[in-house]
Image: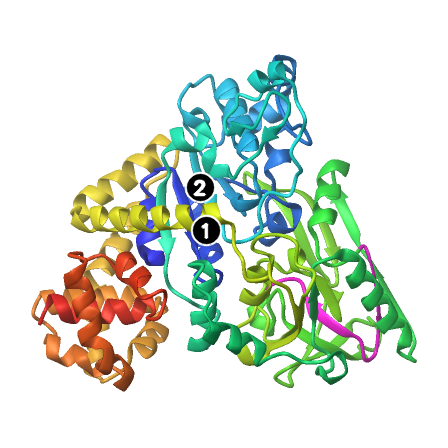
Amino acid sequence: MTQEQALTILKTGANVFLTGEPGSGKTHTTRAYIRYLREHGIEPAITASTGIAATHINGMTIHSWSGIGIRTYLSDYDLDKISSSEYITKRINKTNVLIIDEVSMLHANMVSMIDAVCRTIKRNDMPFGGIQVIFVGDFFQLPPITAPQKIDRRKQQMLLADGTYENDEMEQIGFAYVSDAWRNAKPIVCYLDEQHRQDDMAFLELLNAIRTDSVSEVHYDHIMSRRVTSDSVPEHTTKLYSHNAQVDIMNNEALAKLDAKSERYVMTSHGSDILVSILKKGCLSPEVLELKIGATVMFTKNNPQEGFVNGTLGVVEAFQPGTRYPIIKVRNGKQITAEPMEWAVEENGKIKANITQIPLRLAWAMTVHKSQGMSLDAAIIDLSQVFEFGQGYVALSRLRNLSGLYLLGINEHALKVHPDILIKDREFREKAEAASEAFEQMSQEKIAVLHTNFIKASGGTLETKTVTKIKNKKQDTLLETLTLWQQEKTISEIAKARGLTQQTIFDHIEKLITKGLIASSDFSRLLTPTLIQYMPEIHKAFEGLDTDKLTPVYEKFGGKYSYNDLKIARILHRHK
């Protein structure tokens, strides 16, 4: 599914599970939806399962937002106490859209408790009290982090609970999707299938093989070709480890070895102590940042205008005279002055709390957990002590290509993902394709009515000027793509020129072929020699499986062909 299709579904007000591989644009799509809501006077509740994830989206943890805090179950007393809080009640009562990021790390019982709090405070028995819930995340990534809690049979009933129980005493806490609250919400699955991070086909095939539990000797050889020794790794490249102790020791020792004067930057804060504490825990920059010339650092915020994003690596070159702000030389040779930036919790368009710090951290080493959500040009990765499903996958998928990997070690668990997720992922993909096809069959008029009704139901505002502009844009968008296509531009060139995704441009081209504005034979100019060679095999797979869907064919070949390759093949198969 494309980002544009996912946004169309989100705007209807349906509950949604927005998922996809790392780099597929989940955060970008979420932010686009937040902008859309705010343009129409609707303020969403922006939350995440962890503090680090919350800082990425300028939100708060779902635990704090819901008032549940550190509780692992809700008694009647707990529920009454939360619902009697004027602050929590006011917050939830005026929420029409709830976004929960990094949902893979959220326990099923937590989802149930959030649902219970929302229904109680809203006095509405609909799932989550009638709030539109957007679950965002990828279950192939890191699983829930809290250990199972021992509880008695009486407390099981208090959990409002879902999931399964091994016996009377031990709760088997599962992934968020096993909860009754998730099932009752019936989220539409929007599975983004584009890739905006990795640009290396062999590497993409390796990551896809991990996701489909089909890692072969060839894939293993690819990763082992990047094996290095500790004395042959490149300087100023971040190391990813599975344990905190390794990271702290390495960073402190490396800084101490630099024979230079240090500069210290102390974090400042404003707002309630609780919210400030949450922001500090989620911020990758430390409360006291100590730097020296020659230190390897990583930016912890996004600022594309200045030339850096969360994960950009560099070295401290100097300190600016007067301010003493660090001057960082990044990998492309550019020098960037790192000035203080703000992390904030926003609610109803207002800043409730904020912290300010230089957006850097020492980056000789960091944990895999803290790297989640980052994009790295290069990393030295030690997978020899991986202990969790998905940990190796998360570490590897931070990289843009295989050449950026320097592998120190690997164990037999490193390339494994949770077996339950392998089964569930197929279901998610099939549901996403069904949703995509269902919305493609809807008229634009019907979709526009759904969008309008949701804005009205949420107390938002409709501005004729904005609506007209969007409508005209939809009418003209195919013609703009056609003009660029007729100039012999490639799909990627058209996407870049239009500021759209390649998947969206593929969809435009297919519609233009259907309308007879582009000859299907002309579309074949996108074929590569390799794809031409295997095209009969792909067409045969579509016919043999008696399907027009991409997922069954993708899985038949075990990720051998990308979704874009299969999209090209399907278009040619449909219109031959």
From what the image shows, is residue 298 above or below residue 233? above
Q: Residue at x 66, y 46 (%)?
A: 51
Q: Residue at x 43, y 40 (%)?
A: 41
From what the image shows, is residue 173 above or below residue 331? above
- Measured from the top left, where is residue 29 in percent x and y? 43, 55
Report the Cα–Cα distance between label 2 and label 1: 9 Å
Viewer-side residue, 280 vs 413: 413
Q: Earlier in the sequence, mark 2 or mark 1?
A: 1
Viewer-side residue, 107 vs 325: 107
Name the kind of residue labelled 1 in the image.
Thr
Looking at the rendering, which quadrant does residue 555 occupy?
Answer: bottom left
Tell me which segment is drawn in magenta: 287-302
Name the kind of residue labelled 2 in the image.
Ile
The residue singled out by tag 2 in the image is 134
Q: Residues within 10 Å of mark 1 (few under 14, many from 20)?
A: many
Q: Residues within 10 Å of mark 2 (few under 14, many from 20)?
A: many
Determine whether the residue tagged by mark 2 lies in a helix, strand or loop. Answer: strand
Residue 542 located left or right of residue 72: left
Determine whether the residue tagged by mark 1 lies in a helix, strand or loop. Answer: helix
Looking at the rendering, which quadrant does residue 512 occupy?
Answer: bottom left
From what the image shows, is residue 171 above or below residue 462? above
Q: Are marks 2 and 1 in contact (CB under 8 Å)?
A: yes
Q: Is residue 301 magenta?
A: yes
Looking at the rendering, which quadrant does residue 188 occupy?
Answer: top left
- The C terminus sits in image quarter: bottom left
From what the image shows, is residue 521 above or below residue 418? below
- Measured from the top left, where is residue 488 in percent x and y? 23, 85
Q: Is residue 213 magenta?
A: no
- Measured from the top left, where is residue 362 in percent x and y? 77, 67
Viewer-side residue, 4 vs 255: 255
